[in-house]
């Protein structure tokens, strides 16, 4: 829900958003436009008007304006033109896929090199005073069982994911390495300040439906699994809260460091209960689900390290420093479900 803090926004200075056609970026851009800002939006190929028209349509009905620029994560200098005159860079662009053929080429290289390229552009652009990076809670943890090794049994901003590998959650590894790269680059200069947002698994209504997104895939999965589900733990956050956290990170002068932006420490059953009638925990015990895992598209390692554990993220910094008042879980899921129904996506 809307940020409760007073923001110091200069609408005369444009801002840049990378990965403009992404799920989080679309809602972020929408909120920026509603506040009267000029957004320099980057996409790999902005000449494909059909892919960006929904963003232009939003700008046309808003107080702000939007300009589109080409931006390639793997091409040095690709973001230089878009960044000219911008006071803030929101770096949201990064591949999100849970299953890939080549972890290095599909995830690690674009995430890490892309972050380095964007921040190199920030260094070359005197007008840039702040960079807001979209990281993730998976830069803090790898598996739910990791919580057993954390002091006080609570994940905070001081904790880093140190166990993901190219074979074990390569996406989590990519987010961890990209954020670490960002902090190294930020520490080598004094022109701009880095503030990081670490969202949980993002759900809720996008500016449009993104059929290929992992979030939409997950919602469809819940609806298709029937009433009995395994209680896999999940950190869930509304995409609208993630967008507002980015804006607060950019325009609250004292905002600093990492921010766990997680609305709920929950599990698959509780999430499903908001949109699936009679959803309940599957009667299968963990040992049986472990045995059946390969037959239902899961690994036994995943089952053993996730099922039976709880999420426990501390989101107090996002609440206190950024003023985020998180959407209720039911509101997040029901609004997303309704958007999918309205757009005949389910």
Image (cartoon, rainbow, N blue to C red):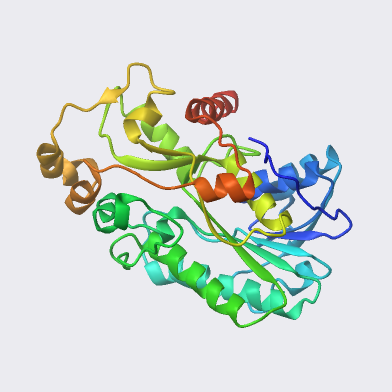
Q: Position of residue 61 (x, y in %)?
A: 84, 37
Q: Position of residue 100 (x, y in %)?
A: 38, 60
Q: Is residue 24 visible?
A: no
Q: Quadrant of residue 325?
A: top right
Count of numbered labels shown in the rendering: 0
Q: Quadrant of residue 87?
A: bottom right
Q: Is residue 316 left or right of residue 79?
A: left
Which is more toward the observer, 232 or 53?
A: 232
Q: Position of residue 209 (x, y in %)?
A: 59, 37
In the picture as drawn, the residue positioned furthest to the bottom comes out as 188
Residue at 70% over, 79% down: 123
In the picture as drawn, the residue positioned furthest to the top comes out as 278
Q: Is residue 86 left or right of residue 332?
A: right
Q: Is residue 166 left or right of residue 68?
A: left
Residue 5 in the image: above or below residue 251: above
State the quadrant of the N terminus.
top right
Q: Position of residue 244 (x, y in %)?
A: 65, 45
Q: Quadrant of residue 229?
A: top left
Residue at 30% over, 65% down: 163
Which is more toward the observer, 85 or 217?
A: 85
Residue 270 in the image: above or below residue 88: above
Q: Is residue 69 left or right of residue 90?
A: right
Which is more toward the observer, 22 or 261?
A: 261
Q: Is residue 125 visible?
A: yes
């Amino acid at each position: 829900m809307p940020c409760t803090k007073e923001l110091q926004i200069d609408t005369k200075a444009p801002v840049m958003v990378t990965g403009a056609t992404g799920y989080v970026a679309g809602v972020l851009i929408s909120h920026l436009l509603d506040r009267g800002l000029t957004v320099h939006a980057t996409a790999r190929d902005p000449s494909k008007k059909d892919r960006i028209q929904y963003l232009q349509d939003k700008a046309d009905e808003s107080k702000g304006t939007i300009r589109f620029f080409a931006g390639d994560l793997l091409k040095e200098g690709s973001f230089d033109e878009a960044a000219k005159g911008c006071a803030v860079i929101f770096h949201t662009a990064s591949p999100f896929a849970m299953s890939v053929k080549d972890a290095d080429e599909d995830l690690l290289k674009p995430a890490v090199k892309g972050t380095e390229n964007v921040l190199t552009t920030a260094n070359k652009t005197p007008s840039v005073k702040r960079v807001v990076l979209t990281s993730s809670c998976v830069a803090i943890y790898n598996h739910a069982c990791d919580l057993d090794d954390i002091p006080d049994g609570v994940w905070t901003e001081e904790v880093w994911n140190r166990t993901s590998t190219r074979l074990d959650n390569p996406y989590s590894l990519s987010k961890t390495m990209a954020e670490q790269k960002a902090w190294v680059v930020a520490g080598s200069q004094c022109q701009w300040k880095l503030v990081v947002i670490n969202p949980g698994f993002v759900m809720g209504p996008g500016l449009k439906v993104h059929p290929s997104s992992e979030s939409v895939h997950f919602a469809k999965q819940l609806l298709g699994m029937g009433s009995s589900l395994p209680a896999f733990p999940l950190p869930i956050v509304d995409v609208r809260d993630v967008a507002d956290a980015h804006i607060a990170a950019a325009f609250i002068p004292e905002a600093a460091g990492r921010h766990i932006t997680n609305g709920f420490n929950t599990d698959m059953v509780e999430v499903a209960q908001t949109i699936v009638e009679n959803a309940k925990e599957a009667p299968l015990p963990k040992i049986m689900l472990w045995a059946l895992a390969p037959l239902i598209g899961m690994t036994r390692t995943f089952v053993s390290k996730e099922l039976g554990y709880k999420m426990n993220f501390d989101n107090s910094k996002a609440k206190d420093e950024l003023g985020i008042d998180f959407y209720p879980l039911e509101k997040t899921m029901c609004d997303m479900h309704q958007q999918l129904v309205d757009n005949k996506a389910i």
